[in-house]
Image (cartoon, rainbow, N blue to C red):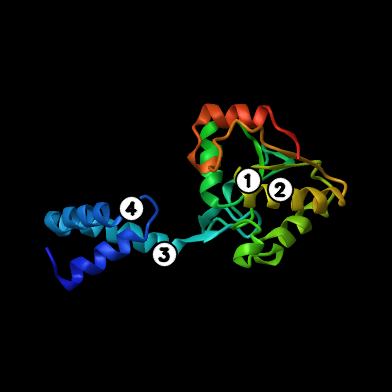
């Protein structure tokens, strides 16, 4: 099948994680064949995401415009003395599913990668440091990827945050190599959190 609307849809789907060109074409074909009954709910969901989802003004997790700060930051039962640092909001969802962490979160929105021209100013490190200035946080747990850039980011954060008098730890290396929090199962995440070590 080849038409401008179909090709445009397949191209957009192919840009999403987990979709190659062929799987994007299959998904586009499935939507096209099902018609309005399938497409309209998808359009409504996409419109709601576009119009309502925003990053939390405190931690960077995904939340809605009418609930900002997010449910994690406003939950008084969470341990405010610990902040777990992740690279993307998706990792917060994975950690919450594991049920192993009950503190606060902070999303860096990436990692430091000099080779790609990404430095500390391109992350939300300054926001994290402002959060630590209250003196309430005693431990920062780094839940970063186990690749070279994740290790470099962890080393940089350890040095910079330790200077603020905060204990910095890192998840145990039970996470798969060249992977990260988002792709780990709940049991692995629970073990990684309970076995965390000094960064």
How far separated are the C-alphas under marks 4 and 1? Answer: 24 Å
Q: Position of residue 30 (x, y in %)?
A: 17, 53
Residue pointed to by mark 3: 50
How far separated are the C-alphas under marks 2 and 4? Answer: 30 Å
**In the image: residue 50, left or right of residue 140:** left
Q: Which mark is residue 144?
A: 1
Looking at the image, which is closer to me, 73 or 11? 11
Q: Nearer the viewer, mark 3 or mark 2?
A: 2
Q: Is residue 99 visible?
A: no
Q: Position of residue 135 (x, y in %)?
A: 85, 48
Proximity of marks 3 and 2: CB atoms separated by less than 8 Å: no
Residue pointed to by mark 4: 19
Q: Earlier in the sequence, mark 4 or mark 3?
A: 4
Residue 29, quarter of picture: bottom left
Residue 83, quarter of picture: top right
For image coordinates 21% across by 67% down, the residue present is 7
For image coordinates 23% across by 53% down, the residue present is 27
Q: Is residue 170 visible?
A: yes
**In the image: residue 57, left or right of residue 13:** right
Q: Position of residue 18 (x, y in %)?
A: 37, 50
Instruction: Name the element at disc 1.
Output: loop
- Mark 4: give few (<14), some (14-19) or many (20+) Cα within 10 Å: some
Q: How many marks?
A: 4
Q: Earlier in the sequence, mark 2 or mark 4?
A: 4
Proximity of marks 4 and 1: CB atoms separated by less than 8 Å: no
Looking at the image, which is closer to me, 112 or 31? 112
Q: Earlier in the sequence, mark 3 or mark 2?
A: 3
How far separated are the C-alphas under marks 1 and 3? Answer: 27 Å
Residue pointed to by mark 2: 154
Q: Earlier in the sequence, mark 1 or mark 3?
A: 3
How far separated are the C-alphas under marks 3 and 2? Answer: 32 Å
Proximity of marks 1 and 2: CB atoms separated by less than 8 Å: yes
């Amino acid at each position: 099948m080849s038409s401008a609307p179909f090709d445009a849809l397949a191209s957009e789907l192919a840009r999403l994680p987990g979709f190659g060109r062929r799987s994007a074409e299959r998904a586009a074909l499935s939507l096209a064949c099902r018609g309005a009954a399938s497409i309209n709910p998808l359009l409504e969901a996409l419109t709601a995401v576009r119009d309502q989802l925003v990053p939390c003004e405190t931690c960077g997790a995904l939340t809605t415009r009418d609930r900002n700060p997010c449910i994690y930051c406003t939950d008084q039962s969470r341990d405010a003395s610990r902040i777990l640092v992740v690279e993307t909001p998706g990792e917060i969802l994975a950690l919450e599913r594991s049920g192993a962490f009950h503190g606060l979160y902070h999303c860096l929105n990436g990692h430091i990668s000099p080779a790609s021209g990404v430095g500390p100013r391109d992350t939300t490190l300054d926001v994290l440091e402002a959060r630590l200035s209250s003196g309430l946080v005693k431990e920062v747990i780094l839940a970063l990827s186990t690749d070279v850039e994740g290790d470099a980011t962890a080393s940089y954060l350890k040095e910079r945050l330790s200077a603020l008098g905060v204990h910095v730890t890192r998840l145990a290396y039970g996470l798969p190599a060249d992977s990260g929090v988002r792709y780990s199962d709940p049991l692995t995440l629970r073990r990684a959190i309970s076995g965390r070590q000094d960064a």
